[in-house]
Amino acid sequence: MYQIVLTGPESTGKSTLAKALADRYNVSWVPEYARYYIDQLDQPYHKADLLQIAKGQLEKVQQHQASNQQLLFIDTFMLVLKVWSEYKYGDCDPWILEQLQQNKPDLYVLCDIDVPWQYDEQREHPHVRAKLFNIYKNELTQLSVPYVIASGNLTQRLDQVHHQLQALGGFES
């Protein structure tokens, strides 16, 4: 199973693209667990919640790994939790860092900030997307993992990822 992780700052179209890719390839996808987790809280989240979110996201990924499909699209994973934890709290739980090294996907899709930021109750920083985008790009370079930057409208992004998937394993939609 090839695992494709969508990553990047908030409100860059990760969920929209993950769902659209899953639809295009007729496979399932793993939604962002953080949204579910935070919706269940009756208070603002704290640093310790990030570890619980990471464990919940990994569990959802592992549940999907049992399927018999060739592709799995994952809407955020450990890199998002690392970047966010370090940005917001100044450090990151060692377990998340360990999982980031142990669970490397076949391809990261870094969603560009060229789409308008949209408000929702879980989004916090509309004015630092460029800074965070650069942090993600640097992290991906340091991890030495394959990645593609998805830019433009949804159709353009789908085509950019499709091109990378063809190079990776000859996948056709």
Image: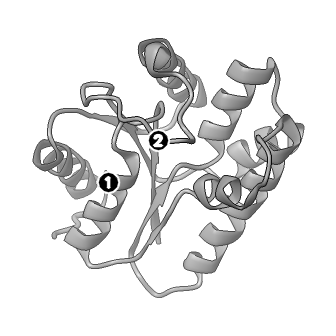
Mark 1 belongs to which amino acid? Thr
* Label 2: few (<14), some (14–19) or many (≥20) C-alpha neighbours in 10 Å: few
> Where residue 164 sits in the image (x, y, percent)?
25, 48
Q: Name the residue under label 2.
A: 120
Can see residue 75?
Answer: yes
62 up-or-down from 114: above or below: below
Tell me the residue at 33%/63% (across/down).
19
60 up-or-down from 120: above or below: below
137 up-or-down from 97: above or below: above
First along the sequence among labels 1 and 2 = 1
Q: Mark 1 points at which residue?
A: 16
* Residue 94 in which image quadrant: top right
Mark 2 belongs to which amino acid? Asp
Can see residue 134?
Answer: no
* Label 1: few (<14), some (14–19) or many (≥20) C-alpha neighbours in 10 Å: few
Give how far apart the Cα atoms at labels 1 and 2 are.
15 Å
Tell me the residue at 45%/21% (across/down).
126
Secondary structure of the residue carrying tag 1 is helix
Secondary structure of the residue carrying tag 2 is loop
Which is more toward the observer, 162 or 83? 83
